[in-house]
Image (tube, rainbow, N blue to C red):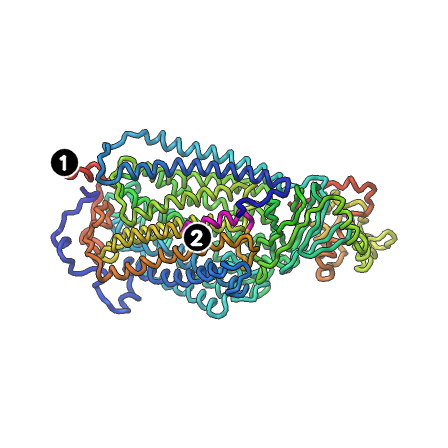
Amino acid sequence: MNAIELEPSPALQEEEPGNYLSESHTVASWLLTTDHKRIGILYLYSILFFFIIASFAAATMRLELLNPQGSLVLSETYNKLFTIHGVLMVWFFLIPSIPAVLGNFTIPMMIGARDVAFPRLNLLSWYIFIGGGLFALYSIVSGGVDTGWTFYTPFSSTYSNTHVIAMAAGVFVAGFSTIITGLNFMVTIHKMRAPGLTWFRLPLFIWSLYSTSLIMVLATPVLAITLALLSLERFWGIGIFDPKLGGDPVLFQHLFWFYSHPAVYIMILPGMGVISEIIPCFARKRIFGYYFVAFSSVAIAVLGFLVWGHHMFVSSQSVYAGLIFSLLSFIVSVPSAIKVFNWTATLYKGSISFETPMLYAFGFIGLFTIGGLTGLFLASLGADVHLHDTYFVIAHFHYIMVGGMVMAFMGGLHYWWPKITGRMYPEFMGKIAALVTFIGFNLTFFPQFLLGYLGMPRRYHTYPPEFQIFHILSTAGASILGVGYLLPLIYFIYSLRYGKKAGPNPWRATGLEWQTSSPPPKDNFLRTPVVKRAPYDYSPFEEEHPQNV
Amino acid sequence: MRLFPSEASSVAPEVDHLVLFLIGLSLIFIVLIFLPLVYFAFKYRRGTKADRTPPRLAQWKLEVTWSIIPLLLMMGVFAWGASLYFHIERPPADAFEINVVGKQWMWKVEHQEGVREINAIHVPVGRSVKLVMTSQDVIHSFFIPDFRIKQDVVPGKYTTEWFNAAKPGSYYLFCSQFCGTDHAKMIGRITVMEPPAYESWLASNSSGGTLAVAGAKLFTELGCSGCHGANSKVRAPKLEGIYGKPVPLEGSVFQIADDKYIRDCILQENHLHVAGFQPLMPTFKGHASEEELMELIAYIKSLGRTNPEEDVNLEGTK
């Protein structure tokens, strides 16, 4: 019983003569492609490249922190390492991860379209992304940057002797790729939906990416402006942020966080969308509270613009401003809580199986919940004064961004892998990797909550010896986490050749993307699907008693 | 292995109470979310005999319940955190001041009595201390974990932070805002002493006069007294008793003569000059260091003060 009307065409069930991968194998066919699926894969390779560099930076830092005196690298190097880690992970991995890879690949298929609204713009956005990446790499290769990913002034604009402008240019350029992608997604979702696919028949992944796109389009220009102002001050000495030139350093923080707090939601909303796809499929249940899950995404996107000042409670911002930002930060936690409750309620009376994507989804709920709850500590003014800029903050946002977003990305990658490649990954290894990731992650980051409360400040190359035990635990966890990421890399490559053929719909999922062959033909569908039902048309009862149906 | 830093200031236990409450609240939420999650995952795992008839849940009621209850709880936590924040941020009126200047990568400290320290502060136990802080280069942050206080130290303005140390001992002072290469070495020590020990420490370390005396010397050296002095022929506002009082500006506006205003008047040409005077004052930008500015302010503060106890706290900065 499918959500759509699509006669099983014989051509579809047989060996598919052509798909988007077999169309052509030349390099030019990849570099000049306008196929959203191929662009998604270009993004996958690109972000994997940046992820590997940024992970090596993190691994070096974790090794370094084993020793309180810091014997492995110099302070300069350490400061450059955390800047590389932050900049690359935020702008060149997390922000494009789910939207530009999985979103690019699945959005048109999930809404029954042949491609995104502007396929050439989509390719352009990848080239711009690569252009930004080259600036960032140039900045790293030519000596690095030591400002941290936050580029706080006047350190970044006047005092740092590193390649700040090149790095800022990289982020500036990559931002345009984000804006174009967001715009493309919004137009696609508005204009390209299949007949019968009304807004409330859209999968929740689409709702979450729509909300994400809204943030991308509205917030990213502010980042561009901020970085341009920073470069103006640094290059020409035009006084904007440095008080010695008549500027205001705290103004930079306002502008930066006006973008970067919404950007945090670019780094979690798509993950929530993936989880909303996986849970109904593996619980064989309709999502509980569809409207609430959908509108909580929109609420998060809108409210996310009004909480930037919670990064500035001790910055010398007015205490009354702090009051408003704290209040709004508590309010923005409610839509996230609503999602978690609805996912849990979806499991009730389901028929639950535990394939790898579902394990990642469970991992996501667990880690995201902890990340969200510790966010309350930081939103609370009186507690934040102590916790601000300590390892508590590091642990908190890694629970959201890695425990949340990366777990969701891995879950989504496993979920759609059969669709992308036409092959199954090895299930047993998948489960092992999910488990190893979960354990490694907690061992890495949970001790950092304790470190933070004890007062260990972030961005410290050396530290008092009493903190060492927690750093050792954290580094041990990081090595386990590394294995958790290495395993999928190996078995995904293995599965490309040796994985068993997936068939069109190995999960028996109801989404439109599953109603076409795997890998899909170049135009996704042999004929445009017509949608007649709400999404997630699963039945746990039929699952358990197939003979009765 | 300690899990909590020591509670060495009057606000530390209050912060810990809030945090313990938040931990308790988090544990309740974790149980409320994880228990059903695990229970459903076990009970309704595929292939088990369980009742899977479509549930008839009152969806709207559930959604409203699990939206409103967390929202109300959040409002409660917000109010608690906010009131504690106001307590942490606002120095009591009887606090005595110590000046702090941050620079890459050290803390320079000046006591009103004229004692100077680097990367160390000696304070008496049980007395409220207000730090008046600025930076001469980038943003730093003055963080004492055992006191549960932190405040960014921002160039171009004065920020304040206060504490009342609860027990004698030595505590870490960290810079918690990344400030460049040796950020991690910008560590100092707060030494909390019994009042008699503190008094003898002060006595044995003060070499010259108080900050106000140093300021008076500068006041002459920099030529301030040429215009603002008692026998000056140039018309310039007299500074006796102005500190902390409203000053009339052009256009019937008043400005409280706080640290920040005095500092800006010294550094910025014709900054908000007093009504009825010609805007003649030159800028002293580049001629006075952050410490010297603080000394000048200490001197102006001391001018015309008949009773030092009436030094009301009218800080404009936070």
Q: Mark 2 or 1, which is nearer the eye?
A: 2
Q: In this rendering, does residue A463 appear at all?
A: yes
Residue at 43 percent across and 61 percent down: it is A54
Tell me which numbered mark, 2 or 1, is placed earlier along the sequence: 2
Which residue does the numbered mark 2 point to in the structure image? A444
Asked if marks 2 and 1 fall on the same chain, the answer is yes
Residue B287 sits above or below residue A436 on the image: below
Q: In this rendering, does residue A528 appear at all?
A: no
* Residue A444 is inside the magenta segment: yes
Taking B151 as reference, is A516 left or right? Answer: left
Residue B97 sits above or below residue A44 on the image: above
Task: Check if mark 2's residue and mark 1's residue have beta carbons within 8 Å.
Answer: no
* Circle 1 crowding by C-alpha within 10 Å: few under 14, some 14–19, many from 20: few
* Residue A308 is inside the magenta segment: no
Which residue does the numbered mark 1 point to in the structure image? A548
Specify the principal SS of the magenta part: helix
Residue at 38 percent across and 44 percent down: it is A366
Residue at the far bottom in the pictured view: A142
Q: Position of residue B216 (x, y in %)?
A: 81, 54
**Kind of residue indicated by mark 2:** Thr
Q: Which residues are magenta?
A: A441-455
